[in-house]
Structure formats: structure tokens, C-alpha cells
Image: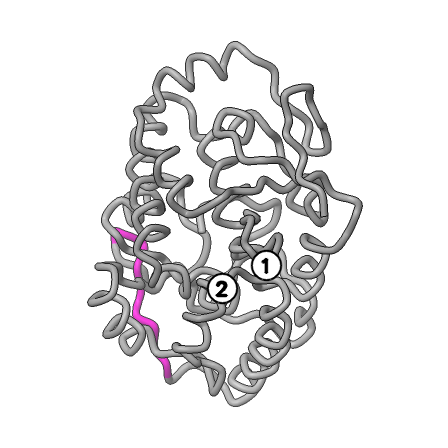
């Protein structure tokens, strides 16, 4: 939810509170938007059994929010008892420090606006469909939820160390576009792929991108692109691996990373361990 664009931000920021939260105001959603939500949900839910990790598929089925745009309060009534997380409504993209503070306190920001019908295939900024379909199911997974909290706490600290770029890369290559090795083969857990009709099969089936075993410093050193399918994906063995990777103090890592050149988004280096299809 943190991020920058080269165009005016979507969403109405006029009614936000100091922490950037707003009321969901469910009555504002039109019949056209409800229908669009149903079509988006039907398309993606038909794809995920072949490409998503089992943890995501199981929770998505249990939540079953395909009948219309979900009420945040109704989801929170299930989410908080499960993992101690709460969804908070926000206008759209947030400043980094606001985003990290929410995560560090087990609050996940969800945009309240929905894309237009003309953006059915592609959208530049995260909307409510991306945030809900892509992110919310795995907030019910305790280990992944703990990873996001640890990430938020690390982000709060990184801001004071001039290291936000490294944290942004970690989020991009794990939470948004991460792959996981499973007994069924490669699967995705990243919200960016799970909410994209095109990139969901691409990330698992295409021979074009690099698929590299997860290495924390390698990920944080790697640039990424926001306007194309990913040229590189990083593969974890388990969500516990992610949580363990974020447990240590990152300060020594930042010192080391600042002494090294960034790695291009499409590069393969000598120490990479490639994952084959």
C-alpha cells in the first residue's frame, strides 16, 4: 500500500484521519461496482487452484467473499480472533512511515475504491480488489501474519537509517510477487500475482523469468519493475523461512548493501541458485 506513482493519486483523501484511515462507507458502492467485483472475483478464483499455494486457496474458500464487495467489519470479526490483525480502510497509497506503522501494529490498510470497468485487465495502483483478494487471505495464516508485523517494525526503523529502498524490494519480491516451493511444485503467495489474471499463470508457467532461491541480501539488492511482468521471482521454502529472515537486526545488512551496487531486475549472478520448472 505504500508507494509512489507518476500520476495523481486515486482515492478521496479529504476525509481521512491523522493516521490516513477513513470510513469504508459501504453505501457508496454502486451496482456497477458490485457487478465488477463479482466478475473480478470469479475470474481470479477460477485461476488460483492451479497456481496459488494451498494456504491461500484454503482461506480464500473459507472466506468466500465473491458475492459482493466485502464489509471490512465482517472480515475483522473473523480476522482478529484468528491472528490479531485488523483491516483499516484508507483512501489509497500511503506514505511509507504511515504504512509501516500500521503493519507494525497489526493493522492492514485496504483501499476503499474500486477500479473502473475499463481497468478490468490492468490497473496501475492497488484498489480494494487487489488488497482484498491478494492480501487478506494470508493475514489469516499466523506465520505470514507475524512476518508482516516484523516487516512493519523493520520499516519504521529503516526510515531513520535511509534504507527504505531495501525494505521496498523485500516487500515487492515477497508479499507482492513471492513464489513458494510446495509438494505440488512452484506456487505463488504474492498479492500482485494472485490478483492479476495475466501474471498469475505467467509466474508459474513461463520459461522467460528467472526464478531464484530466496536470499535476503540478494533480494534487497535487486531492483524491480512496476510496469511489466516480473523478470525475476524469488522462491521461498516456507513462510517460516520469511519470518526467520526478518528476525535479526537489519542495520548491519544496510551498511553492507550501501557498499554494493544494485542488481538489475533481469540479472542472474554467480551465487544465485536457480529454480527450474
Residues 228 and 45: in front is 45
| Image location of residue 215, percent across then percent down | 52, 30
Using a 10 Å C-alpha cutoff, classify the residue at mark 1 as few (fewer than 14 neighbours), some (14 to 19) or many (20 or more).
Answer: few
Q: Is residue 179 left or right of residue 210?
A: left
Q: Is residue 272 left or right of residue 101?
A: right
Q: Nearer the viewer, mark 2 or mark 1?
A: 1
The residue range painted magenta reads 18-26
Residue marked by disc 2: 54
Dot 1 lies on which element? Answer: loop
Q: From what the image shows, is residue 263 above or below residue 211?
A: above
Q: Quadrant of residue 100?
A: top left
Q: Name the residue: 56% across, 86% down.
A: 35
Q: Is residue 125 left or right of residue 105?
A: right
Q: Name the residue: 51% across, 85% down.
A: 34
| Membership of 64 in magenta stretch | no
| Image location of residue 223, percent across then percent down | 62, 31
Q: From what the image shows, is residue 64 above or below residue 31?
A: above
Residue marked by disc 1: 184
Amino acid at each position: 500500500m505504500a508507494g509512489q506513482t507518476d500520476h495523481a493519486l486515486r482515492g478521496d483523501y479529504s476525509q481521512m484521519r491523522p493516521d490516513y484511515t477513513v470510513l469504508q462507507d459501504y453505501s457508496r458502492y454502486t451496482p456497477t461496482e458490485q457487478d465488477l467485483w463479482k466478475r473480478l472475483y470469479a475470474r481470479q478464483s477460477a485461476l488460483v487452484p492451479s497456481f496459488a499455494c494451498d494456504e491461500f486457496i484454503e482461506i480464500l474458500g473459507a472466506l468466500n467473499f465473491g458475492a459482493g464487495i466485502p464489509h471490512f467489519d465482517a472480515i475483522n470479526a473473523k480476522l482478529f480472533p484468528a491472528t490479531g490483525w485488523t483491516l483499516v480502510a484508507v483512501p489509497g497509497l500511503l506514505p511509507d512511515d504511515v504504512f509501516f506503522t500500521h503493519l507494525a501494529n497489526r493493522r492492514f490498510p485496504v483501499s476503499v475504491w474500486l477500479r473502473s470497468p475499463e481497468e478490468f485487465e490492468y490497473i496501475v495502483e492497488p484498489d480494494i480488489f487487489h488488497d482484498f483478494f491478494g492480501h487478506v487471505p494470508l493475514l489469516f495464516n499466523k506465520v505470514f501474519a507475524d512476518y508482516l508485523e516484523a516487516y512493519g517494525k523493520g520499516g519504521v526503523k529503516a526510515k531513520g537509517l535511509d534504507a527504505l529502498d531495501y525494505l521496498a524490494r523485500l516487500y515487492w519480491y515477497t508479499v507482492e510477487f513471492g513464489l513458494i516451493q510446495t509438494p505440488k511444485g512452484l506456487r505463488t503467495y504474492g498479492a500482485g500475482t494472485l490478483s492479476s489474471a495475466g501474471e498469475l499463470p505467467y509466474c508459474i508457467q513461463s520459461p522467460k523469468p528467472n526464478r531464484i532461491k530466496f536470499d535476503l541480501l540478494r533480494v534487497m539488492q535487486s531492483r524491480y519493475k512496476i510496469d511489466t511482468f516480473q523478470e525475476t521471482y524469488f522462491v521461498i521454502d516456507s513462510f517460516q523461512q520469511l519470518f526467520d529472515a526478518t528476525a535479526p537486526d537489519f542495520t548491519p545488512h544496510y551498511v553492507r548493501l550501501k557498499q554494493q551496487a544494485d542488481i538489475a531486475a533481469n540479472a542472474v549472478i554467480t551465487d544465485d541458485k536457480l529454480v527450474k520448472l
